[in-house]
Image (cartoon, rainbow, N blue to C red):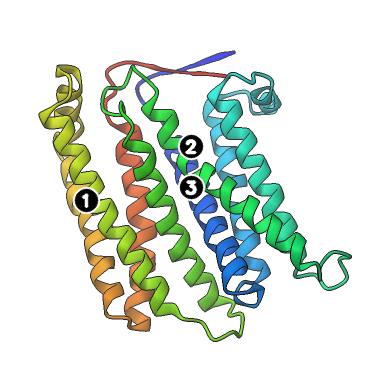
C-alpha cells in the first residue's frame, strides 16, 4: 500500500527519526558497556529507555502515515524498506526488554553470563541498524535531491550514537549504578562524535554545492534559504556540536550535563532541518 504525503510534513516524522535513533544509539552504548565493562555499569533503566524511545517513535510514524490500527501491514511486504526498518526496530525492542530482565533477580536466566553477552552482541548490531536506517531510507528517495547519496545514513548514525552517549550519561546521573564510572572517557567519546559530525556535515554540504547535479544544488540552496540556514549552522552545528564538544573537553560534571542536553536538542534540530528540507515534490512511502 502506498501512502502519499504532501510537501507540508508534520513534526511526527522527524520526531520518529530522532526517537528511534536515540533509542538505537542508547541500546548500542548500554550493550557495549555491559559487554566490555560489566553489567554492574548498566541498570535496568538504561535498557528500558530504548524501548520507550523506539516505541514512541514507531507510534508517531504510524500516526504520520495514517491508519495506525493497520500498522501490522508494515510487516507484510518483505521487499519494502519500511518492513526492514520495522523488523529491525521490533527485534531491538525485544532484545532491550530481554536485557532489562537480567536486572530482575527471580528471572531464571538472570545469572546466565553467556546468554547476556550473546544478547548484548545482537542488541549492538540491531541498535546500529535502527540508528542507521532512517538516513538510508531518505538517501534512497530520488524525489528529494537534498537527501540523495550515501552520506546521509552515516551522519544519522553518528547523531544517534552521540545522543545515545548523552542519554546514557544522564540516566547514570539520575539513577546511578553505584559502580565507579569513568564519565570523562564517555565525554571524550562524544567529543569525537561531535568532531566527526562537523566534518561529515561540512563535507556533505561541500559535495552537494560543488559536484552534485543541478537539482541537488538547487535543493541545497532552497534548504538553507531564510532562517533555515541559521537553524542549521547556528542551532545544530554551533549549539548542538561545537559548544557541547568544547564543554566535554573540560571534563567538568556540570559542563558535561549542559553538553548532554545540548547534544539532544541539536540532534532534534538536525532531523527537523533535514526531513523538512526540499519540498519540491510529494513523497511516497511503500508499505
**Who's the residue at 50% across and 41% down the image?**
16
Q: Quadrant of residue 241?
A: bottom left
Q: Secondary structure at mark 1?
A: helix
Q: Crowdedness of circle 2 by 10 Å Cα count: few (<14), some, many (20+)?
A: many
Q: Residues within 10 Å of mark 3 (few under 14, many from 20)?
A: many
Real-space Cα separation, disc 2 to disc 1, in angstroms: 21 Å
Position of the C terminus, as image quadrant, is top right
Q: Earlier in the sequence, mark 2 or mark 1?
A: 2
Query: Residue 113, relative to residue 162: is it above or below?
Result: below
Secondary structure of residue under mark 2: helix
Q: Position of residue 269 (x, y in %)?
A: 32, 48
Q: Answer yes or no: do the residues labelled 3 and 1 have beta carbons within 8 Å?
A: no
The quarter of the displayed image where residue 87 is located? top right
Q: Mark 3 and mark 1: span between their CA atoms?
A: 20 Å
The reply, left or right, for residue 196 in relation to residue 233 is right
Give the residue at mark 2: 133
Q: Secondary structure at mark 3?
A: helix
* Residue 23 badge: none
x, y percent for residue 231: 22, 47
Q: Earlier in the sequence, mark 2 or mark 3?
A: 3
Q: Residue at x 58, y 80 (%)?
A: 176
The residue to which callout 3 is attached is 21
**Residue 199 has which mark?**
1
Q: Quadrant of the N terminus?
A: top right
Locate residue 58, reporting x and y percent. Answer: 59, 39
Comes first in the chain, label 3 or label 1: 3
Number of labels in the image equals: 3
User: Picture coordinates of residue 78 (x, y %)?
Assistant: 64, 21
* Camera-nearest label, 3 or 1: 1
Q: Nearer the viewer, mark 2 or mark 3?
A: 2
Q: Is residue 134 above or below residue 239?
A: above
For image coordinates 44% across by 55% down, the residue present is 161
Amino acid at each position: 500500500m502506498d501512502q502519499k504525503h504532501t510537501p507540508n510534513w508534520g513534526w511526527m516524522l522527524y520526531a520518529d527519526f530522532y526517537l528511534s535513533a536515540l533509542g538505537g544509539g542508547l541500546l548500542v552504548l548500554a550493550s557495549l558497556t555491559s559487554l566490555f565493562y560489566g553489567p554492574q555499569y548498566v541498570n535496568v533503566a538504561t535498557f528500558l529507555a530504548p524501548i520507550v524511545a523506539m516505541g514512541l517513535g514507531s507510534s508517531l510514524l504510524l500516526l504520520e502515515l495514517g491508519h495506525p490500527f493497520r500498522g501490522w501491514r508494515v510487516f507484510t511486504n518483505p521487499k519494502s524498506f519500511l518492513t526492514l526498518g520495522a523488523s529491525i526496530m521490533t527485534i531491538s525492542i525485544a532484545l532491550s526488554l530481554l536485557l532489562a530482565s537480567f536486572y530482575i533477580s527471580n528471572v531464571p536466566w538472570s545469572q546466565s553470563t553467556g546468554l547476556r553477552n550473546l544478547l548484548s552482541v545482537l542488541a549492538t548490531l540491531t541498535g546500529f541498524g535502527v540508528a542507521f536506517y532512517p538516513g538510508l531510507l531518505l538517501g534512497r528517495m530520488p524525489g528529494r535531491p537534498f537527501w540523495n547519496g550515501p552520506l546521509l545514513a552515516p551522519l544519522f548514525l553518528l547523531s544517534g550514537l552521540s545522543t545515545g552517549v548523552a542519554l546514557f550519561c544522564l540516566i547514570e546521573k539520575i539513577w546511578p549504578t553505584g559502580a565507579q564510572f569513568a564519565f570523562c572517557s564517555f565525554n571524550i567519546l562524544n567529543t569525537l562524535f561531535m568532531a566527526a559530525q562537523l566534518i561529515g556535515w561540512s563535507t556533505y554540504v561541500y559535495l552537494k554545492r560543488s559536484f552534485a547535479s543541478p537539482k541537488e544544488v538547487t535543493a541545497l540552496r532552497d534548504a538553507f534559504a531564510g532562517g533555515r540556514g541559521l537553524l542549521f549552522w547556528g542551532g545544530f552545528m554551533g549549539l548542538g556540536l561545537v559548544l557541547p564538544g568544547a564543554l566535554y573537553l573540560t571534563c567538568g560534571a556540570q559542563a558535561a550535563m549542559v553538553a548532554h542536553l545540548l547534544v539532544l536538542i541539536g540532534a532534534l534540530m538536525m532531523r527537523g532541518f533535514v526531513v523538512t528540507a526540499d519540498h519540491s515534490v510529494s513523497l511516497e512511502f511503500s508499505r
